[in-house]
Amino acid sequence: MRLHTRGILLTGVVTVGALWSALPAAAAAAPVAALVGDQPGEAGPDLLFLPNIDDDAGVCRERARALVEGAVDRESADDEAFWEKRAELEKEPDRAKAEAEWAELVRTHRWEQNQTDRDLAACNDAADDVVDGGDDEADLGRFRTRAWAAAPASASGRLTVPAQDAGRIRLFVHRPDGAAPRGWEAIGPETRLTAQELRRGVELGVEGRDVVRDTAQWDGRTRVTLTVTADGASSSATLTLRQAPVLTQLNTAPVQEVLRAGTDEGDTYAQAFVKELDAALPAGGVRRPSRALDTKGDTWVQDAFEPGYVSVPGRNGRPHGMRVLITSVNDDRRIATRTAFTELAGHDVAAVHISHVPDVDENSSYDSMGNLETVPPSPGNPHGRVVIGGDGLAPGPSGPAPEMLAFLRAQGMQDPVSLDTSWLTIGHVDEFVQFLPAPGSRLGWRAVVADPRAGLALLREVRAKGHGADPLHGGLPELEWPYDGRIDQRSVNAFLADTQFTGTNERAAERIDANLAVLKAKTGLTDAEIVRVPALFTARSLDYAMLETEIRGMQDGPEKDAKQRQLAAMRDAVAEIPGTANGLVLNGGHYVAPKPYGPVVDGKDVFAEAVTAAFRATGYQVSYVDDLISTHVGEGEIHCATNTLRDVFGPETRWWREH
């Protein structure tokens, strides 16, 4: 198929003030200015270009590792000083003064601790004015001047961009015989196109120097103006440009690589988890074992960054672009997020740091990237919509971070939908909803949703069959301390008699219903596209355990009684059985779920049987991986402990077609 290029030919006003079409024959040599974008016609009226923030030459990774290593002692000392200052403020009698100083201390400390992150992000291909090889050259948006064969020797051309955009993009002129690498010379204020270049037409390039972060500052659109002067007359033409937005990857795209945290020597539970995980990957079309990242002991790779991408029409008919890893602004994940720069950023892979001014009342867990998922495309949302959890159905001071929301909205393609995750102890959307590709279905995908009502119903069925005295968690391995205390080993009857347990699940079901109502309204989801999997939640989180331990050490009296009432009133939820909605979507109708360890009846785990049946009904096979000790006791599951890199440059990712 022939790809038609489109050009903009705007002939400006000559010095005598007459339009080109109105000039007399004697003025036929008036300057000609025209710019032509080199891209397929389907791309629309604007020349599309990339934020050129990957590292094709591979020069940043070693620098990044040195920066991170060099920051350890400084950040540790800063943390120590921070907590010392906090202790001083707790003694300040003027509480208003103390609170104001505390808020400023939090903001200042975060800014100082993120200095390394800003330094990491500053190293990329757009950080200098050199085209570093063929791969870097391929990332330039291309356009050219239309040849003016009759240009006189006095003719010259000048290229300019609006002053406010001068730091956002960089222009290049291709001069094959020049001294610049690969002939691409950066255009500065003094650069002029020669008469010879104007006669034959000259190739030009453009790169973005950063992603679009906030439309209040820039929406990614700009223009370049060519002004041609000859024999005292001038003419100009303008080409409009648009930088490619950052889109988050979809679960409907094929998995290419699975990422997870490295394991410590001697951590047999983590090593067993990795072995089972890797064994499940080939059936899901993933040929390579999972890739270990050095997250410095942080298990939750999903929370460290969200994989995204930018793309423009490629010269081979396929989209061309780069991955963009959007790192978390949660300071608890600060060290782990740096793996995006030290181990992943490079050729066609970029990473971005989003600066955040913290609020003293925020819940930083809302800023972990396990709390950000993307609903696949639906009517009116051709590229899907980001979903992000928080305290209620509208963002508030507790989070998520306004800078992250501004960044997501600024892309203009996957308008974020707010969900309520305040009922969860951790507070992440991946604890109760997941999205599966479903080729041939109405939407092309389905939502996997945790169903605590179905979980309670299964327990009642187990009791009705005479197995109420059996443990809820059947088939457990021999548990060592402290895990024998973290896994609740009560019977099915005891769980059902526990009003805190049943109340927690009833509350969870109501909150999930409310979130589903939002998804239905915003994305076109219907009950027909929902795969409900039985789930059980509990209020007995790590927070519960710490409060329980505190109570044990208290003397009898009103204060202890108040703490006991606080304990009994807790309803914020974590998974009781390993949450199967919190799994890993692979290719070809394959799903990896945590082994649920539900009640065993007639030799079968009733939860595993029900989950398998639910997935089978939508054409999926389930592989179960034991994450009980490796991740579940830490209040996460397989999805939390993994991340994926998917094929984001297929034909369906041509965002410019629908915009």
Image: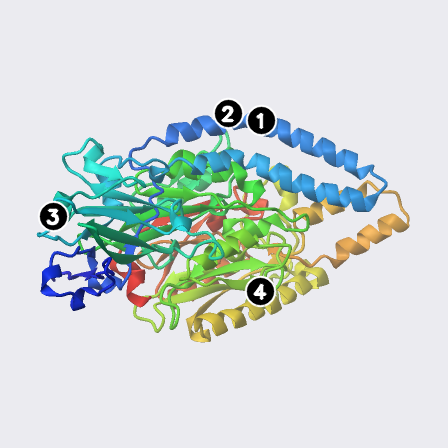
Mark closer to the chain start, 3 or 4: 3
Q: Pointer 2: what residue?
A: 70
Q: Earlier in the sequence, mark 1 or mark 4?
A: 1
- Residue flagged by tag 4: what amino acid is it? Pro
Residue 380 shown left or right of residue 566 in the figure = left
Which residue is label 3 attached to? 152
Q: Amino acid at mark 2?
A: Gly
Please state which of residues 60 and 151 is positioned toward the viewer in this rendering: 151
| Amino acid identity at mark 1 | Arg
Q: Nearer the viewer, residue 583 or 430?
A: 430
- In the picture, measured across the screen, residue 189 lies left or right of residue 641, that is left
Horizontally, is 57 left or right of 424 in the view?
left
Q: At which x and y percent is residue 463?
A: 61, 65
- Per the image, the residue denoted by label 1 is 74
CA distance separating discs 3 and 1: 62 Å
Q: Nearer the viewer, mark 2 or mark 3?
A: 3
- Quadrant for the C terminus, please: bottom left
Label 1 SS: helix
**Nearer to us: label 3 or label 1:** 3
Q: Nearer the viewer, mark 1 or mark 4?
A: 1
Verify CB contact (< 8 Å) between mark 1 and mark 2. Answer: yes
- The amino acid marked with disc number 3 is Pro
Q: Which residue is mark 4?
A: 452
Task: Give how far apart the Cα atoms at labels 1 and 4 are.
Answer: 46 Å
